[in-house]
Amino acid sequence: MKLIVTQENLARALAVVGRVAQAKAQLPVLSNILLKTDNNQLLLAATNLEIAITERIGAKIQTEGSITIPARLMSEYITNLPKDNISLELEKNKLHIITENFRSTINGVSAEEFPELPAIESPTEIIIPAKDIKKAITQTILTTSRDETRPILTGVYAHTQDESLYFAATDGYRLSEKKIISTKEMMKAIIPAQTLQDVTRVLPEDCDEVKMLFDSQQVRFLMNDIEITSRLIEGAFPDYRQLIPSSSEVLFTCSKDELMRITKVASLFARESGGSVTIKTDSTVGSVSIHSLASQLGENTSEIQTKPSGDGQITLNSRYIIEALGVIDDTEISFGFSGKLAPCVVRPKNTAEYTHIIMPLKS
């Protein structure tokens, strides 16, 4: 193998694919990145057997070939080289890296030992605008569970219903659902949260659309020259829609920033109580207040002026409120609940395409 690439392209691609290479993998080759010539491009790939990331970059190929190279050393070395052309020359299992002022050799491992890159047979394809899938991931991934004993809840449920694609996730304490696009394709898949995090992290700024290919076991995201392929989580996702109230006895709309501000203030006094704050509405005077108590430090009550539809109170985790408000882009939000023990519903004021549910705490 002999080729020439630019330092900028190679460094960027190494950073993208190297994120799944494991430093202390059971199989040593999994800590390596595969370099392989592919027509007039250089293919870079890494995998941890659950997720595989590949990227193709332009290269001047003189001789075909392939090798796997330690991910961390290769990435850190190339990143520190000046922005210039880099020559890569493979001699047996030694990769010679040559620039105008630098010359290094890195010992590699034969590409034959690298796991076969995953293939998706007869996939179903859905094309999603890049900005829409990035927003959907951001708005749902925060409610996935980190409890590995319930793997189904550690992913985002991507499914179609009524000719629309939805992302949904729940950790048992809160739930989020995002309507993304209209589609006639049928889909039911639980995508690992880590996979979706990688999608948002490597999504190129100049990428206009993301192709999502899937079968019964795997999903692949195509983003320009970058591909992320992941196993799906096996199992049936719970019927989460039965947890979404059809209406709320107490409902108010307000500025997202105002509610965020008074919630953050209240959270300062709620640290002793696990973030517990109590929201109370007063339709007579037209206000919503948040109260928090710290037995050793004091207490706080903050309020905003609005017009709630009724009177009531509910105790919630302040962190959950802050995180829900943080992923809503709209300046105005709708906030509803029905009594102390019913789920609380947070939505953007002018659209029902995103729903965020927070379960109450026992006050």
Image (cartoon, rainbow, N blue to C red):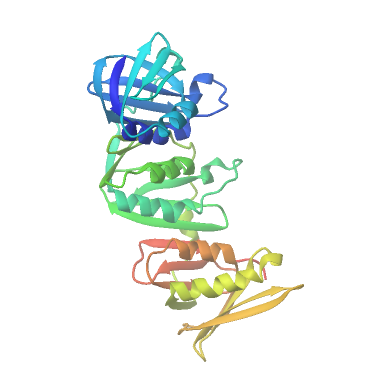
Coordinates of residue 107 in the picture (x, y in percent): 47, 15
Outermost residue, bottom side: 284
**At 69% across and 74% down in the image, what residue appears?**
293
Coordinates of residue 310 in the picture (x, y in percent): 50, 83
Outermost residue, top side: 92
Q: Is residue 72 left or right of residue 101?
A: right
Outermost residue, front side: 101
**At 49% across and 29% down in the image, what residue appears?**
72
Q: Is residue 215 left or right of residue 358?
A: left
**At 27% across and 38% down in the image, what residue appears?**
224
Report whether residue 51 is seen. no
Q: Quadrant of residue 189?
A: top left
Q: Quadrant of residue 94?
A: top left
Report whether residue 296 is seen. yes
Q: Nearer the viewer, residue 162 or 61?
A: 61
18, above or below 243, in the image? above
228, above or below 355, in the image? above
Q: Is residue 205 left or right of residue 236?
A: left
Q: Quadrant of residue 115?
A: top left
Quadrant where the C terminus sits is bottom right
Quadrant where the N terminus sits is top left
Coordinates of residue 6 in the picture (x, y in percent): 30, 30
29, above or below 126, in the image? above
Q: Is residue 217 left or right of residue 313?
A: left
Q: Nearer the viewer, residue 354 or 326?
A: 326
